[in-house]
Image (tube, helix red, strand yellow):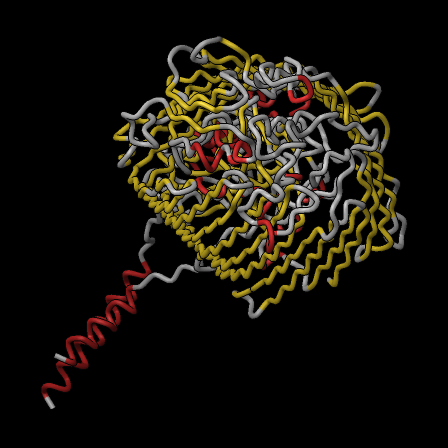
Amino acid sequence: MYIIMKNLILAVVVFFAGFSIQAQEKLSKNAKYVIEVNGNCEQCQNRIQKAAYSVSGVKSAVWTIETHELSLILNEEKTTILAVKKAIAKVGHDTDEVKAIVESYNKLPGCCQYERK
Amino acid sequence: MKKQISILLLFLFCSFNSFSQDTLKEIKVQSANKSLQKSLKLTANTTLLSSKELLKAACCNLAESFETNPSIDVNFSDALTGTKQIKMLGLTSPYLMITEENIPSVRGASQAYGLSFTPGTWVESIQITKGAGSVVNGYESISGQINTELIKPIKNIPFFLNAYGSSDSRFELNTHFNRKISDKWATSLFVHGNTRVSKNDMNNDGFLDNPLAKQVNILNRWQYTNAQKGWVSFINFRYMNDKKQTGELNFDPNRDKLTTNYWGSEINTERFDISTKLGYIFPDMPFQSIGFQNAFNSHNQESYFGLKQYNIKQKSYYSNLIFNSIIDNTMHKFATGLNFTYDKYEEFVNVTDYSRTDNSVGAFFEYTYDNTTNFSIILGGRVDNHNRLGTFFTPRLHVRYNPWEKGVLRFSAGRGKRSANIFAENQQLFGSSRNFEILNSGGKIYGLNPEIAWNYGLSFLQGFKLFNRSGDVGIDFYRTDFQNQVVVDLYQGPQQVVFYNLNGKSFANSLQIEFNYELAKHFNLRTAYKYYDIQTDYQYVTQERPLQAKHRFFGNLEFETHITHKGRQWKFDYTLNWLGKQRLPATISNSGLDSMPEYSPSFSVMNMQVTRTFSSTFEVYIGGENIGNYKQQKAILGSDNPFGTNFDTSIIYAPIFGQMYYAGLRFKIK
C-alpha cells in the first residue's frame, strides 16, 4: 500500500515536472518565422535581407517580392524576432510591429518606396 | 528496475517538447521556359541545358546532346566507331570531369565511348561548367565539368515512348515506365535499344562509314522521399550491352576475324552499374544536410582492330560523404567530406598485360561566401592520397561579381591531376598501322607520370534589351597550362605514335565571344565565335595540337509557333557550324595518295529539325544532319592495303557520311 502510494506520488511529480518544463519557453536554435515586410523591387530584397543578416543570430533570411514575406530562421538564444524587425525598420522598411521613421523611408531609392499603410 | 525505466520514459515523454514545427513549405520551382540558362547568380561559369534543349536536335545519346550549344565542340565521329567526341576549351573529354548525378561516370575504360552509353531521353538536364570545377566531386577535372541529371521517378509521367529512324539505317526505341508506389516510393524502368542494320559506304573507299551496331540499355531507379523527415534516397540499377562492327564492306567476323582476308573491327562492351544516393536534410535547418553517395560499376570491353587486340575490364567503387552547413548565417556556407575511390583494371594490348589497381582516399573542404547582392566567392581545397599519384593538394577558386544590372564578371582558377589511360583514351589509333611507343619508363602509370594542369579563366556576360527584345552578349577567356602532360605525338611519322612525359610547355588558350538575341517573339538567334591557340612542345617540334581548328563559328536559329488550345505547335531549328583549317598529323612521308596535306580545308556543316506537336502527349519530328552534304574526301589512308604500313582511319577532320535524314515520334501517357 505504502509502496503503491510512493510510486503514485513519484509519477504525479514527474508528470507535473514534465508539464512545467513544457510551460517554459524553450529557446530554439533554429526558430522559423515568416513576417510581412513591405517593399517593392529587387533592390529592396537585397536591403531587407542584408538588414536581417546584420543581426547576429539570424541564420537564413529570404524575402520574396510577390508575397512581401520574409522567411527567417534565427537562433533564439542569440536574438529575437523583434530585434530583426527593428533592424529592418532602421533601413526604411515597415514591418507589422515596427515602423520605419520618416527619414529612413525617404532615404530609399525611388523604385523601393512602397505604399505606406 | 522495470518501474524505474517506466518512470524515466514517462518523464522523457512529458518533457519532450512537441512544438508544432512550421516546416517550411516545399517551394516547387517551375522550370523556366528557357532551354539554355545562363545564370547571373551562380558563382561558377555554368550553363544549364534543360530537357527542352535536348529536343531541338536528334540527341540520341549524351554525346549528341551538345549540338545546339556553343560551349562544347562536338567533333565528328571517327571512321571506326561512329561515336562523336566532345571537346571543351579545345581539350578532349579525358580532361573533363563527366558525372552523372554528381558521381563520376565517363572515365577510365569508358572514356572513349562512355557518352554514347546514356540515351538522350533519360536526361532531365545537363550542367556544363567551364574551367576548374568544384572540389566536391574529385581532383581530375582540368578544363571543365559536365554533370547529367537523369529523370527522377517522383516527377515522372507513367509512360513515354520514342521511336527514331534515320537514312543511315539507324533505329532507336526508348520506352520509359514509371510508377508511384506510395507517397514516398516511386520507381522507373527505362529500356533503350538501338541498332544499325545496313552497310553504308558513301565515299566508296571499301570501308563502312559508320559501324553496324546493336545496343540494349536498361535502367531501373527507385526513389524514396520523406519530406517531413528530410530523407531522400535513390537506388539505381543499370545494365548495358553494346556491340559494334566496322571495317571493310566484305568483312565477315565469323570468317575473317584476326586474319588478313579483310580488315575489320569489333568492339563489344558490357557494363553493369549499381549506385545509391542517400540525402538527409535536417528538418528545421534547411541549410544543413548530409549526403552519402556510393557507386559500383563493372565494365568489360573486348575488341579487336584488324590484327590488334585490346581488352579492358574495369571494376570501380566510388564513395563520397558530404556535409553541408553554414557558419553563422546563409551568407557563409561550407561543404566538407570524405571521398574514396577504387579501380581495378585488367588491361591487355595484344599480349602485353597493363593491369593495375588504383585507389585513393581524400578529404575536401569548400567555403562559399555570398553577400546576396553582387558578390560571391567559392574557395575549395582537397587533399588526396592516391597509390599512383601520391599525396597532393588541389585548390580551386571561383569568384563572381555583378558590377551593374544584368552584368556578371567571373573568374576561376584551379589545379587538376589525373592518370592518363593512354590506350583507352586513344583507341582510335588502333585502327591504323601505327606502332605504339612509350618513351619513359620510370613513372607509375604505363611508365609515365601523372598529368597535372592549372586552369585560369575570366568571363563576362551582359544581358540587354534592344527594341524591347532581350539578348545577351558574353566573352570568356580560359587558359590551361600543363605542368606535366602525357604527350601523344603524331608528328614523328605516320607509322608510329609516341607517348612521353612533357618536356617543355603545353598550353591551351581559348576565347569565346557569344551574342544571343530574341529577334521576334519565339524566334531566337544564338551565335558564337571561338578562337583556340593550343600548342605543345613535342619531342622534335613545337606545334599546334593536331585536329583542332583555330577558328570556329557557331550559329543557331530557332522558331516556335504559338501553342494552340489543342496543344498543337510547330518548332523549327537550324544550326550552322563553320570550322577553319585544322593541322593534320604528319603523313608527308607516305607516298602519293596516302598522304594528307599539312592543313585540312575549312568547311561548314548545317543541321535542321522540324517538330510538329499534335497535343501535349504526341509529337513527330523530322530533320537532317549535314544537309550541305560536306564529306571528307579521303577519310581512310591506305584503304587499298589495310594491313600495309600506310593504313590510318584516325585522321578525321570532317563528316564522312554526308547528308543524313531522320524522323521520329514521341508519345506520352500522363
Quarter containing the N terminus of chain B:
bottom left
Looking at the image, residue B445 lies above or below residue B545: below
State the residue in front, A20 or B37: B37
In the current view of this chain or complex, which residue is farthest to the left?
A: A2
For residue B553, side relative to residue B444 (left or right): right
Residue shown at the point (63%, 64%) measured from the top left: B178
Quarter containing the C terminus of chain B:
bottom right
Q: Position of residue B105 (x, y in %)?
A: 48, 44
State the residue in front, B162 or B244: B244
Q: Position of residue B113 (x, y in %)?
A: 55, 42
Residue shown at the point (42%, 12%) measured from the top left: B539
Residue shown at the point (53%, 65%) measured from the top left: B185
Looking at the image, residue B556 lies above or below residue A70: above
Looking at the image, residue B475 lies above or below residue B181: above
Looking at the image, residue B629 lies above or below residue B531: below
Q: Position of residue B339 (x, y in %)?
A: 33, 42
For residue B440, side relative to residue A61 (left or right): left
Q: Kindly indicate the quadrant of the structure image that contains residue B524.
A: top right
In the current view of this chain or complex, which residue is farthest to the bottom?
A: A1
Q: Position of residue B367 (x, y in %)?
A: 38, 30
For residue A72, side relative to residue A20 (left or right): right
Q: Kindly indicate the quadrant of the structure image that contains residue A16.
A: bottom left
Residue shown at the point (59%, 62%) measured from the top left: B188
Q: Kindly indicate the quadrant of the structure image that contains residue B591.
A: top right
State the residue in front, B90 or B271: B271
State the residue in front, A73 or A78: A73
The answer, for residue B232, to whether it is visible in the render is: no
State how many labels appear: 0
The answer, for residue B334, to whether it is visible in the render is: yes
